[in-house]
Amino acid sequence: MRIPFIAGNWKMNLSLEDALDFIDSIKKDLPDSNVTETAIAASPLFLQSIIDHKKDSQLKIIAENCFYKDDGAYTGEVSPKVLSEIGTDYVIIGHSERRKYFNETNDIINKKVHAVLRNNMNPIICCDETMGRLQSENKIHWVVNQVNASLKGVSAEDAKNIIIAYEPSWAIGTGTSASNDDAQEGCYLIRQTLADIYSDEIADEIRILYGGSVNYKNVTSLMEQRDIDGVLAGKSSIDSNDFIKLVNYKKNQNK
Ligand code: PGA
């Protein structure tokens, strides 16, 4: 069974003080992790403090990025080994903002996926898609290509520990989410690609998220889609009240 995964991605938005206040205000209202797994992606500057602060809560911690080497002379980079040492659970790899502003290629992303797995954490691999490609019918090729490239050399056993996020860049931060059908189609394509690489059984076990202008109002209908197992929310994860409503979408459904 794939447990729903609802994650916030703060990006470079909060101060350390805001971040700790946020954790304090949400930790008692999180759903049980057997029902919905919840997580926050934060700057490496905050991770240790957040991990100390969230003690005894079921919140999982995500790093927004890391380097592909464990140690060495790489000034300014974030070591996956140290992320693991401090208790990080997941690492976002290949977010469209990393691809766009920091020139991350499929090859770099693949190396980072291996680095995260090697250090016993779980990668959340983001697949992007531009508006141009959506319209030019190259969507299938584009997404399939990114999934294939990011998983090169990843064993079936390790693949069970990954999460993939379908995040069309035209929906990120724009306030316009993909339609339920488009989001489902993207996630379905990813699952088919995983089945081609591994097997139907493995593809069935891997969680696939949708990201791009998700909020507490549209999360329920997105989560009803067959191949959407969770969401990655940017803007609507900055306010703790919004985030609490988002992660408790199942409760709100019954109101
Ligand atoms: P958004 O960001 O929710 O602000 O669109 C999503 C993301 O970048 O993961």
Image: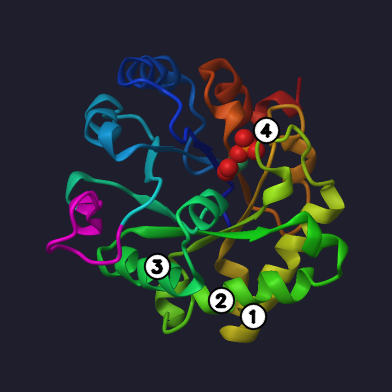
The residue carrying mark 4 is 250
N-terminal of the pair, mark 1 or mark 4, is: 1
> Nearer the observer, disc 3 or disc 4?
3
Q: Which residue is mark 3?
A: 113
Left or right: where does residue 87 sit relative to residue 247? left
Question: Label 2, on which residue?
Answer: 202
How many angstroms separate mark 3 from mark 4 (CA)?
31 Å
Q: Is mark 2 within 8 Å of ligand 1?
A: no
CB-based contact (under 8 Å), mark 1 and mark 4: no
The numbered disc on residue 237 is: none
Judge the density around disc 2: few (<14), some (14-19), many (≥20) Cα neighbours within 10 Å: some
Q: Is mark 1 within 8 Å of ligand 1?
A: no
Q: Quadrant of ligand 1?
A: top right
Residues at marks 3 and 2, CA–CA distance in whole angstroms: 18 Å
The residue pinned by badge 1 equals: 195
**x 56%, y 23%: residue:** 244
Q: Is residue 81 magenta?
A: yes
Q: Start and end of the magenta stretch?
A: 67-84
